[in-house]
Amino acid sequence: MTRATITAIIVDDEMLARSIIREYLAARPEVTVVAECANGFEAVKAVAELKPDLMFLDIQMPKLSGFEVIELLETPPAVVFVTAFDQYAVQAFNVHAVDYLLKPYTQERFLEALEHVQQRLAAAAPPPPVKAAAEEAVSAQQPLERLLIKEGSKVLIIPAEKIDYIEAQDDYIAVRAEGKSHLKMQRLSALETQLDPRRFVRIHRSYILNIERLAKIELYAKDSRVAVLKDATQLPVSRTGYDKLKDLL
């Protein structure tokens, strides 16, 4: 890749922060800013439509965080995180971010990050950000307060308290909430570690239950029980799952 072919988008909810990046990029005509985004939803849409080489990405934003943006992207571009918070640095490099700029930063430090980007883009087959690591970075702010599920061009945000139960389906999970099921590519065991253990219980190898939805537990057969939800849905309860429920109820 030549120095004249880098396309970039700037993602930050603060206009001043976006204008500083534009100002610093003015000295580097080889970088063309193709979009500015004030939130994560705009960023996901812009990356899908414009397929930029580079994304300057804030972390703490309304609607979607920077890590949630990466989680939702099919093919993320090279990422330089630009944030006022230093506690996310480890997670940032776990998703193969090229650099991590801590606000306020100097133009010299910014251009150093840009050099790192050019080196990354010039290398053969640069590793993209890793979705699993992005999910882990999101879950570092435990307990998980919401689930993001991409359905076609739409992004669903399901608050944790709206979830009834979650069912394992091979490499996917089916999230049941407000009478509807939504598929997300994630292992149930990975999600279990992210949820609030005071609210969500792994009642069976294939099910995690929001205990606020539980109406009663019934004996189904010898040493076999079912959880009956308030909407009359029945879910199997393993012996271990029953012990967990007894501890909470």
Image: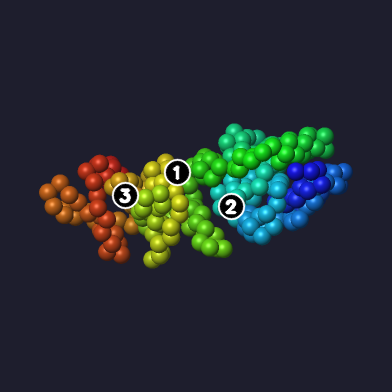
Q: Which mark is residue 206?
A: 3
| Residue 10 vs residue 119, the one in the foreground | 119
- Provide the secondary structure element on which disc 1 rests: loop
According to the image, label 1 marks what residue? 194
Quarter of the picture containing the N terminus is: top right
Q: Residue 73 carries which label?
A: 2
Q: Which residue lies furthest to the left in this view?
A: 222
Residue 89, percent across and down? 63, 35
User: Residue 232 sits in which quadrant?
Assistant: bottom left
Q: Residue 51 carries which label?
A: none
| Residue 62 vs residue 154, the one in the foreground | 154
Looking at the image, tell me whether mark 3 or mark 1 is earlier in sequence order. 1
Please determine whether, in this image, residue 50 is positioned above or below residue 4: below
User: Residue 102 sits in which quadrant?
Assistant: top right
Please determine whether, in this image, residue 123 is positioned above or below residue 191: above
Residue 209, percent across and down? 34, 52
Left/right of residue 68 with respect to residue 107 in the rendered view: left
Looking at the image, tell me whether mark 2 or mark 1 is earlier in sequence order. 2
Looking at numbered disc 2 in the image, what kind of residue is underneath it?
A: Leu
Left/right of residue 228 with respect to residue 28 in the rendered view: left
| Residue 132 vs residue 246, the one in the foreground | 132
Residue 63, percent across and down? 60, 55
CA distance for labels 2 and 1: 20 Å
Crowding at dot 1, Cα within 10 Å, few <14 / some 14-19 / many 20+, comes out as: some
